[in-house]
Image (spheres, rainbow, N blue to C red):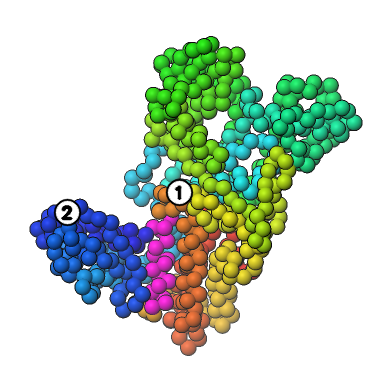
Amino acid sequence: MIETHLAGLIGQAIANAQQSGALPAFDVPECPIETPKNVDHGDFATNVAMALAKPAAMSPRKIAEAIIAAFPADPMVAAVEIAGPGFINFRLSPLWLQGAVRDALAQKSAFGAARGAGEPAIKGRINLEFVSANPVGPLHIGNARGGPYGATIANLLEAVGYEVCREYYVNDGPDNTQLNLFGGSVQARYRELLGLPSHMPANGYIAEYLIEFAQAILDRDGDAHAGIPEDQSGYLHFARLAAPLVLAEIRDDLENIGVRFDVWFHEQSLFEHDQVMAEVRRLQSIGSAYEKEGAIWLKTQEHGDDEDRVLVRADGAPTYIASDLAYAADKIARGFEHLIFVLGPDHAGYVPRLYAAIAAQGFDTSRVEVIMYQTVRLMDGGEVLKMSKRKGSMVTLREITDDIGADATRFFFLMRSATAHFDFDLALAREHNEKNPVYYVQYAHTRICGIHRKAAEVGIAMPAEPDLSLLTHPAELALMRKIADYPGEVAEAAETRAPHRLGTFARELATTLHQFYGPCIVVDAAKPELSGARLALIEAARVVLANICGLLGISAPERM
């Protein structure tokens, strides 16, 4: 980001001035960078000299003079000036801004990526696990939020140079209480369809979608499962029959909004290959697990947990923590150097326990990153829509996508920080005007395409080497600044795991374009050279919009 770069230059200038004795020693604070309301005051400004008056025991203007005198040369900055009692104003180099436009035109889809730039903060391959909803029914608005978020984080990390594996963890182990309840519920519906006596498990699932899965099993297998007993073994049997049907639906619903996985990892495979008990035995061998009261315990209290946790119950059944540790060990064994878990709000209490358990395994917890997204409240015309997967009063991801389309669904999920609660406004998402943010962004891209078509109709083409020095209007310079800021925005969004920044940036770019069109006529037969330069400028903006849409996983239409 331009502001971040300028702040770094100011910090360097202060350090230079302190080293020369022009400024006394003091801790350098954060340097706030603002956009002046008056364009005559430059492109950016800071009041850092005023903030330093007390620690430096000097007047702000004297401090500003010292900072400017020690300011390092940089191709981005054309001039640094003092204003008023000590404000520092910056004017960006027109050549640097023109260079950003040329970069966008030359690099196209690669513009904004920073592959190979500098030393990566994370070494090696990244395993990014997200969604991983229990296979007990279709995705609903709450657990679906992790899909677009995780997928876009993966896109961002790849854009800045990392190798990412997108992974879905299928909770289908033998000790999954919810999956077994689901299996028992499907069994009850299956028996009902056959006209047989049935018993719904206590706290079972009564949603209507259970009938669909039971009917699918009946259509495929007939009454082959009629003799299965209605007990825990029967519940597990029907869970094994129904879970693949659920997963197929989940996969389709996610792919419909552009969310795809490289690996679908099944918890059951850990048991089939004895990886769970093998990890328990390893933990015992290194002294991280011990036996007490017939059970095997993990020493998590030594690593910040409020108590040690049971790995294997006295009856010999492993707990879900044992499965999770076997899964973490499997990821490490597959060569992943960094593990990212994207979890929903219902896992809040589990996060400290997860870190403690992985530390007890002997793994470096700095290689583990947990991101928690918050709940989504679905709104429609001011009404809050309630959701309960078990009772069936829920709105599924498929219903939302069918209603507002894949692009709006994905964009709206990404509009707010994942760490903030979010109201998903269906009524707004249905709008086809500038009030709808995804429509606003896509229309900005479409309008540029339309201008290019208009230019072609009147015989004006964007030259191979446009004269960008003609772009001197404040609206042109504002658009150039926005284009130049894009690579930094991608890097910041990737580093902070904040894809919502891209949606905000895209809306700001669309607004800047709208403000540009007023005073700046792009296609003007009387001014072919200026028209060529402006066509190049909006084409660079189109590249940025298209690249943002690509990272967010939405389309960039040429016509609407």
Q: Amino acid at mark 2?
A: Phe
The answer to whether marks 2 and 1 mark residues whose Cβ atoms lie closer than 8 Å is no
> Which of the 4 quarters of the picture holds residue 196?
top right
Compared across the picture, whether 43 is left or right of 266 comes to: left
In the image, farthest residue toward the top: 294
In front: 56, or 503? 56
**Span shown in magenta:** 474-490
Q: Position of residue 302 (x, y in %)?
A: 39, 24
Q: Which residue is mark 2?
A: 26
Residue at (65% x, 61% y) in the render:
382
Compared across the picture, whether 368 is left or right of 321 comes to: left
Residue at (43% x, 81% y) in the render:
530
Q: Is residue 489 magenta?
A: yes
Within 10 Å of the Cα at label 2, are there few (<14), some (14-19), or many (20+) other Cα atoms?
A: few
Q: Which mark is residue 497?
A: 1
Task: Identify the main secondary structure in magenta.
Answer: helix
| Residue 74 vertical placement versus 324 (above, below) | below
